[in-house]
């Protein structure tokens, strides 16, 4: 294939669209767990946890709270591993590149689908391993796809948010499995088909993805894949060097606006000196930006995971165990998940709204990016509070409002998380910081299980007081956008003071 811009555009377009299809169809299906639980209960998974108890008027009733707890634990572990393993997955991706990381992800995904295909009610314990493999394999596919945004630098943030939205929307896959189940297609058959789809992932890995990484920004004539490989004359070391130079330029731009010494020139500074000016990974982790961002993500992530993990027993309780109503609301929840890919780009547009506009005098690009992130963080926090309030009210019809709020907030949450890390910290630490935040937030998400135990053993299955506590806790997330706002205002005041001083010096000099 000849190396040409047209050929590269075709390659980039195929990579972009096939990546969206991959994320939409496979990457985040584990978050459609509520639909899967409905099927698994019908097939008798964990049915041994249901026991006969004495109810009102000495009547015997079946108590399946133990079964619900087991299903919730399966999701708790899977969702924990998604975030907790983000740091080692990120290191693996940075160290060994796209191909190795994707092959591991495909192996985990295929293992999960096969375990589901060959499981049954007698081997219910396999769900723990199967869902965990599906969850981790899916997040690896998303991780390797997000770099595709580097191919389209003018729309990079929007593309990253689209992939995160597709990841959220893929939870509707389990709705399709549920609909097929109701048409007498067994769950084993559905998962065998999903397992066979691993061939698609392998073909993308070798034909439409790079062996190492997609650089930012991509040089002219850059290409990859088996078909286009010969046209790529750049090696990894050259591309990484280009990335370090670009990062150094950003550092110098920041130094020029924050230093009292004007006229700082890039060519007069060595690469070692530039490296010294980049904040260390440790200083980034210990910064207030990082700590408040970690709390912001952790609280809202816990709220989402607890909502999804307890959705089925909540619907059963609110519908008085009416299977038809539970199925109806489960379908409604799964259908709304499809809207994730439509909602996610809105956050990207909020973050990129200042691009192409003139900046204030002396304002750096990073400062402008941070200023634009305030609205994104605030809108996401408001969405999270509204979602939590609706989820707290024990009224079944109100859940028709809770579902779209949950999808909208989740779509904003993870896209905004990745975007803020890329805006607030040096690019050389992005992978480590992104993984560190997700891993630490996963530890926080383990509070799901004591919350579930409290609901079951102390609150008689009614999570109202736990929901109230989490809603109050959600108020803390507003500290993060407030902190960024105060930081940007302080930078603006310092910039204005420098301009006033410089203007005063010029006036004094003119008078002299």
Image (cartoon, helix red, strand yellow):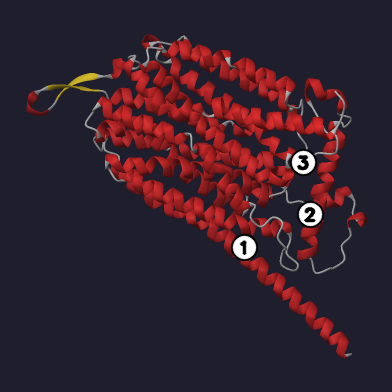
Q: Residue at x 37, y 33 (%)?
A: 332
Whether pointer 2 and pointer 3 mark residues with C-beta atoms closer than 8 Å, the reply is no
Of marks 1 and 3, the one in the foreground? 3
Which comes before the other along the chain, label 1 or label 3?
A: 3
Q: Work out whether 120 lies above or below 468.
A: above
Q: Specify the label residue 398 is tagged with.
A: none
Q: Quadrant of the C terminus?
A: bottom right
Q: CA distance from mark 2 to mark 3?
A: 16 Å
Q: Which residue is mark 1?
A: 487
Circle on res. 251: 2
- Taking the image as shown, residue 491 lies to the left or right of residue 236, namely left
Q: Residues within 10 Å of mark 1 (few under 14, many from 20)?
A: some
User: From the viewer's perspective, is the residue at label 2 or at label 3 nearer?
Assistant: 3
Question: Residue 342, percent across and down?
Answer: 53, 40
In which quarter of the view is residue 486 placed? bottom right
Report the residue at 85% width, 38% height from top.
Answer: 220
Q: Which residue is the extreme one toward the right?
A: 268
- Say whether residue 426 is visible: yes
Mark 1 in CB contact with mark 2 (< 8 angstroms):
no
Q: Nearer the viewer, residue 464 or 447?
A: 464
- Residue visible at 44% across and 18% down in the picture: 127
Query: Few, some or many C-alpha atoms within 10 Å of disc 2 (few <14, some 14-19, many ≥20)?
Result: some
Provide the secondary structure element on which disc 1 rests.
Answer: helix
The location of residue 333, given as percent across then percent down, is: 39, 34
In the image, is 189 to the left or to the right of 492? left
Along the horizontal axis of the image, is 366 left or right of 374?
Answer: right
Residue located beneath label 3 in the image: 216
Q: Nearer the viewer, residue 176 or 51?
A: 176
Element type where label 2 sits in the image: helix
Q: Residue at x 66, y 55 (%)?
A: 369
């Amino acid at each position: 294939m000849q190396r040409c811009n047209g050929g590269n555009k075709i390659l980039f377009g195929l990579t972009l669209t096939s990546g969206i299809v991959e994320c939409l169809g496979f990457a985040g299906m584990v978050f459609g767990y509520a639909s899967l639980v409905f099927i698994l209960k019908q097939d008798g998974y964990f049915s041994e946890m249901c026991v006969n108890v004495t109810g009102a008027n000495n009547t015997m009733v079946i108590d399946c709270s133990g079964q619900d707890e087991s299903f919730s634990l399966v999701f708790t572990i899977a969702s924990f591993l998604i975030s907790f393993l983000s740091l080692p997955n990120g290191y693996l991706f940075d160290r060994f590149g796209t191909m190795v990381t994707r092959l591991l992800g495909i192996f985990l995904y295929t293992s999960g689908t096969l375990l589901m295909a060959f499981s049954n009610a007698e081997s219910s314990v396999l769900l723990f391993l199967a869902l965990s493999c599906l969850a981790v394999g899916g997040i690896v596919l998303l991780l390797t796809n997000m770099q595709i945004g580097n191919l389209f630098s003018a729309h990079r943030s929007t593309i990253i948010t689209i992939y995160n939205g597709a990841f959220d929307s893929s939870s509707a896959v389990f709705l399709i499995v549920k609909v097929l189940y109701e048409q007498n297609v067994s769950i084993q058959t559905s998962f065998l088909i999903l397992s066979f789809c691993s061939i698609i992932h392998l073909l993308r890995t070798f034909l439409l993805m790079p062996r190492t990484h997609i650089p930012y920004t991509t040089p002219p004539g850059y290409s990859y894949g088996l078909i286009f490989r010969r046209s790529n004359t750049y090696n990894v070391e050259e591309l990484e060097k280009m990335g370090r130079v670009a990062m150094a330029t950003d550092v110098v731009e920041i130094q020029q606006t924050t230093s009292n010494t004007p006229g700082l020139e890039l060519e007069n500074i060595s690469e070692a000196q530039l490296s010294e000016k980049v904040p260390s990974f440790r200083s980034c982790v210990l910064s207030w930006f990082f700590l408040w961002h970690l709390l912001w993500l952790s609280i809202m992530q816990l709220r989402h995971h607890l909502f999804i993990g307890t959705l089925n027993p909540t619907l059963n309780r609110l519908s008085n165990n009416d299977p038809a109503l539970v199925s109806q609301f489960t379908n409604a929840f799964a259908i709304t998940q499809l809207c994730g890919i439509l909602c996610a780009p809105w956050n990207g547009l909020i973050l990129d709204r200042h691009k192409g506009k003139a900046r204030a005098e002396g304002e750096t690009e990073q400062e402008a990016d941070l200023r634009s992130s305030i609205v994104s963080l605030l809108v996401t926090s408001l969405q999270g509070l509204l979602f939590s309030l609706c989820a707290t009210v024990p009224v079944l019809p109100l859940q028709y409002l809770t579902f779209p709020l949950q999808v909208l907030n989740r779509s904003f949450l993870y896209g905004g998380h990745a975007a803020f890390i890329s805006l607030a910290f040096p690019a050389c630490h992005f992978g480590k910081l992104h993984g560190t935040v997700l891993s630490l937030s996963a530890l926080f998400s383990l509070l799901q299980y004591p919350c579930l135990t409290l609901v079951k053993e102390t609150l008689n299955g009614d999570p109202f007081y736990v929901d109230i506590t989490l809603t109050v806790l959600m108020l803390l997330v507003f500290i993060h956008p407030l902190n960024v706002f105060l930081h940007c205002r302080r930078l603006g005041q310092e910039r204005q003071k420098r301009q006033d001083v410089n203007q005063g010096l010029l006036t004094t000099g003119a008078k002299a």
